[in-house]
Image (tube, helix red, strand yellow):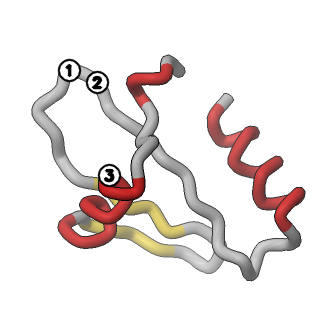
Amino acid sequence: MKGAEYLTKPQQYALVYRQGSSVASDLVVLKWVHNRLTFSRFGFSVSKRVGNAVTRNRLKRLLRE
């Protein structure tokens, strides 16, 4: 994915959490907001309940691939 396809600013994540829809399972929560762009933008956040910082960062890197 290209850099423009990521959520990068705290305000962007706040918008998704405030106005977005969501679907949840035991391990994953998917949140989204519809946009008017021709492509989707992604951001990954991992709960502190998942391992330590190294584990969480590795998981986010794998999701971005």
Q: Around disc 1, counting alpha carbons within 10 Å, would you say few (fewer than 14), some (14 to 19), or many (20 or more)?
A: few
Mark 3 or mark 2, whichever is nearer to me: 3
- Please state the horizontal and vertical placement of residue 27, each as a whole percent of the image: 65, 73
In the image, taking residue 42 as reference, residue 21 lies left or right, namely left
Instruction: Please state, as top left, top right, bottom left or bottom right, where the C terminus lies in the image.
Output: top right
Q: Is residue 15 above or below residue 39?
A: below
What residue does disc 1 label? Answer: 38
The tag earlier along the polypeptide, 3 or 2, is: 3
Q: Give the structural element (helix, strand or loop) at label 2.
A: loop
Residue drawn at x 77%, y 60% is 56
Residue lying farthest left?
A: 36
Q: Nearer the viewer, residue 16 or 14?
A: 14
Q: From this view, report whether residue 7 is shown above or below residue 53.
A: above
Which residue lies under the disc numbered 3? 12
Give yes or no for contact between labels 2 and 1 (Cβ–Cβ under 8 Å). Answer: yes
Q: Earlier in the sequence, mark 3 or mark 1?
A: 3
Q: Amino acid at mark 3?
A: Gln
Q: Indicate the quadrant where residue 10 lies.
A: bottom left
Across and down, in percent, residue 11 comes to 31, 56
State the CA–CA distance, disc 3 to disc 2.
16 Å
| Cβ atoms under marks 3 and 2 closer than 8 Å | no
The residues tagged by marks 3 and 1 sit, at their Cα atoms, a distance apart of 17 Å
Q: Quadrant of residue 30?
A: bottom left
At 69% from the left and 48% from the top, the residue drawn is: 60
Q: Amino acid at mark 1?
A: Thr
Between the residue at mark 2 and the residue at mark 1, the CA separation in whole angstroms equals: 4 Å
* Residue type highlighted by circle 2: Phe
**Residue 56 vs residue 26: left or right?**
right
- In this image, 14 relative to 25: left or right? left
**What SS does tag 1 mark?**
loop
Of the residues tagged 3 and 1, which is closer to the observer? 3
Residue placed under numbered mark 2 in the picture? 39
